[in-house]
Image (tube, coloured by chain):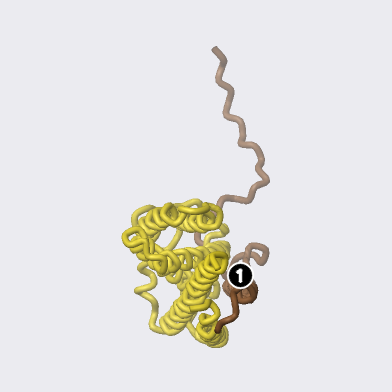
Chain colours: A brown, B yellow
Amino acid sequence: MYAQSPAAPPPASTAPPAQDEFVPISELPADEKLPAAPLLIAAYAVVWIVLAVYVWTLWKRFLRAEQDLKQLAGRLPPAR
Amino acid sequence: MLPGDHRPMLQRSFVFMLLTGFALVTAAPLLIAAAPYESTMGLIQKIFYFHVPSWIAMFTAITVCGVASVRYLATRSRSADRLAVSAAELTVVFGLIGLLTGPLWGRKAWGHYWQWDAKLTTALVLWLIFVSYNLLRRFGGPGSERLAAGVALFGMANVPFVYWSAHIWRTVHPKTSVVMTLGPGMRPAFYWSAFGFLLIFGALLGARTRLEALRASIDEAYLSAEDI
């Protein structure tokens, strides 16, 4: 059985003190603020990039179908 | 009828599609900029005007795909199958927009791009179900239509879970009732954007279904040409 030692002082901490109250967003330090505009513009760009890529792939498939159609017309006998 | 007879319809459909897209591009940002800021999130909340309409378009696409799949399973209608495969492809397109715009909003609102909570996870699973539908149609070979129609029904059955997940489970995602309680100043931008997305969905669905019909006609004509 060990003798109980007197309570030691808590170790010195480098972490900032715990925060227990609300801080308005306008009072946050600059490095903790995340600008909204780039994210909003990125979201808008995502919409049009995805739709533009899809329309482009659809258009390419139409062109391929037209090519097949031309090849098919060459194989069919001429209409009387 | 030779497949070439489809061409004027295809051209009209693309013109319609481009006009609706142009109308949305030019007018939506003006309405969105004029809409008031939401009180707690501020500017970033305006992603709502693209994010929610993309999910509305996706749920519409899933409903079309599911109903067409039921019709295909019941009647073996080729036109129903063509509609189902077209709607399934658009489900993936509009779902991708929702899955990419949501995290951009979440980064600012929650401090994280992604949370594995019920709403986000069920939405991702639903999107993956329709990715699997498209992979099945692309690589499944003959007979994959019926299996894919079953996958579409499974996907459609998941929609209520995604829709109600924010109400049933504790999630970081806002409840779907937020749409019904929009402020009067926000409604014109939201309804315009939702209308624009649905218009684009309709135009793309029409064009995609006609492409599917054209391909089927070409295949049939090839088979006929080989018989001659």
**Residue at horizontal 56%, vertical 16%?**
A3
**Would residue B4 be found to the left or right of residue B84 on screen?**
right
What amino acid does circle 1 point to? Leu
Q: Is residue B212 above or below residue B160?
A: below
Q: Is residue B146 above or below residue A53?
A: above
**Would residue A5 be found to the left or right of residue B1 on screen?**
right
Out of B186 and B26, give the one closest to the viewer.
B26
Residue B164 at x, y = what percent? 35, 59
Q: Residue furthest top?
A: A1
Out of B76 and B39, give the one closest to the viewer.
B76
Out of A51 and B40, give the one closest to the viewer.
A51
**Residue at horizontal 38%, vertical 59%?**
B156
Q: Is residue B26 above or below residue A64?
A: below
Residue B215 at x, y = what percent? 54, 69
Residue B189 at x, y = what percent? 46, 82
Circle 1 sits on which residue? A39
Q: Residue furthest front?
A: A80
**Residue at horizontal 50%, vertical 61%?**
A22
Residue B198 at x, y = what percent? 45, 77
Residue B146 in view (yes/no): yes
For disc 1, the chain is A
Q: How many numbered marks, from 0 up? A: 1
- Please tell me how crowded label 1 is: few (under 14), some (14-19), or many (20+) other residues with Cα within 10 Å: many
> Mark 1 falls on what kind of element?
helix
**The C terminus of chain B sits in image quarter:** bottom right
